[in-house]
């Protein structure tokens, strides 16, 4: 297999197992997003892929040994991704928090569980996690935070007999067996343990115990902020490490600190097997959600650059906010709805930077082109937004 093909497979597998992290408008959609991303057992990964992932983990261990913070560790191996430079800047700009909260899942157990499903939901109560806020950076406009979440106790629970109480399954594989090539995204020894257990049982089930941080944060006033960017990976079989970026509301008045709430979601996956096939279902108890208040200092500052120009003769206004991490903003163009705007690159002291997060929208009155650029090494000279199409270079927007 060619190197490029292997890289694509590795990235796909890591995204499948560790991603999380899709934007959502509410906590409920965040939860459902996570469930949909986890619910299917993956086919067995080739040995070459296992070796490649082991190498990635080895690089992560080297980063820890080098004394990097979590932003720096998460940057390792992402050289080809658009967030690489931003994570490097965050490693230098973020403050170390290092505060750990020991969490215990609460809730009410069934007085007398009548099904396996009821008993498994009851088993979630009393489970413990360690949530550590590792690093944070806030400039009053955006908030970035990096954390680790450790799931204490055994990750797997195995039972013999029919998994009763499930009215339907999220995925069903008639006439298939776990040993036909499925795995749970765990190490080979645990996958083999599961395969042996289900092989020896006429019917049986396995529960993969998991927990996640809900997408985004909630401010003290109840405002939910969805992620602008995020990423995660497994540090080991028990520990997730991740980062997230959210944009604070327009007009938000940040003081010396910003206070918000993270939600820890207990969400297990049940894998059942009997003579008819192999089945999967998600198991989540809403009472088992944990709300964790967090406070981090506001240590960064921003400055705003503006410029005006034209785009195909239509008036264009640009706003770009400079932080310790990157530059972001927008160009608005007063043009009819059917107008198709051009994108922009940033020219800083003669060096061109691509727009790494470009998307466009029409808000009913104007076209808005959203911009995001890596922070230039040199910020002392002219900053110019250049149309992507060189034929329109005369419509460049100078920022000041």
Image (cartoon, rainbow, N blue to C red):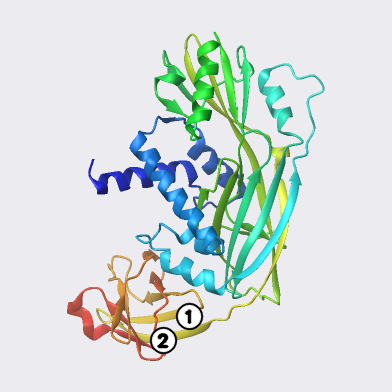
In the orientation shown, which residue stands out farthest toward the left? 391
Which residue: 50% across, 64% down? 72
Query: Can I make out residue 181 in this image?
Result: yes
In this rendering, is residue 293 above or below 164?
below
In this rendering, is residue 19 above or below 78?
above
x and y percentages locating residue 245 in the rendered image: 54, 62
Which residue: 44% across, 19% down? 179
x and y percentages locating residue 148 in the rendered image: 61, 53
For label 1, the residue is 322
- Do the residues under discs 2 and 1 have CB atoms within 8 angstroms? yes
Residue 96 location, quadrant: bottom right
In this rendering, is residue 296 above or below 307?
above
Crowd tier of the residue under label 1, counting other residues whose Cα lies within 10 Å: few below 14, some 14–19, many 20 or above? some
Which residue: 73% across, 16% down? 114
Callout 1: SS: strand
x and y percentages locating residue 44 in the rendered image: 40, 29
Callout 2: SS: loop
For label 2, the residue is 379
Residue 386 location, quadrant: bottom left
Quadrant (top left, top right, bottom left, bottom right) of the C terminus: bottom left
């Amino acid at each position: 297999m060619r190197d490029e093909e292997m890289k694509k497979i590795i990235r796909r597998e890591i995204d499948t197992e560790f991603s999380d992290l899709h934007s959502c408008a509410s906590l409920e959609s965040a939860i459902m997003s996570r469930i949909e991303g986890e619910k299917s057992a993956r086919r067995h990964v080739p040995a070459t892929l296992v070796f490649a992932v082991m190498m990635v983990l080895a690089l992560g261990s080297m980063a820890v040994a080098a004394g990097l913070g979590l932003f720096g560790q998460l940057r390792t191996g992402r050289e080809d991704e658009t967030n690489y430079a931003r994570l490097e800047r965050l490693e230098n700009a973020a403050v170390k928090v290092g505060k750990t909260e020991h969490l215990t899942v609460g809730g009410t157990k069934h007085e007398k569980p009548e099904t396996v499903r009821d008993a498994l939901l009851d088993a979630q109560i009393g489970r413990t996690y360690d949530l550590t806020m590792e690093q944070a950076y806030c400039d009053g406009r955006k908030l970035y935070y990096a954390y680790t979440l450790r799931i204490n106790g055994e990750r797997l629970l195995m039972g013999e007999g029919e998994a009763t109480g499930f009215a339907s399954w999220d995925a069903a594989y008639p006439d298939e067996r776990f040993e036909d090539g499925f795995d749970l995204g765990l190490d080979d020894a645990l996958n083999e343990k599961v395969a042996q257990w289900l092989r020896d049982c006429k019917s049986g089930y396995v529960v993969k115990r998991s927990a996640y941080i809900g997408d985004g944060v909630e401010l003290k006033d109840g405002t939910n902020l969805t992620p602008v960017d995020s990423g995660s990976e497994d540090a080991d079989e028990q520990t997730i490490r991740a980062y997230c970026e959210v944009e604070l509301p327009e007009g938000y008045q940040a003081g010396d600190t910003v206070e918000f709430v993270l939600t820890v979601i207990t969400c297990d996956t049940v894998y059942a097997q009997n003579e008819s096939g192999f089945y999967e279902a998600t198991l989540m108890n809403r009472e088992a959600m944990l709300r964790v208040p967090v406070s981090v200092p506001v240590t960064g500052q921003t400055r705003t650059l503006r410029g005006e120009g034209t785009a195909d003769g239509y008036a264009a206004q640009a706003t770009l906010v400079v932080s310790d991490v990157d530059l972001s903003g927008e160009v608005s163009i007063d043009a009819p709805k059917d107008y198709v705007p051009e994108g922009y690159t940033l020219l800083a002291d003669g060096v061109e930077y691509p727009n790494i997060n470009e998307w466009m929208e029409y808000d009913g009155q104007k076209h808005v082109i959203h911009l995001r650029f890596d922070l230039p090494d040199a910020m002392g000279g002219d900053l110019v937004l250049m149309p992507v199409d060189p034929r329109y270079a005369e419509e460049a927007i100078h920022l000041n």
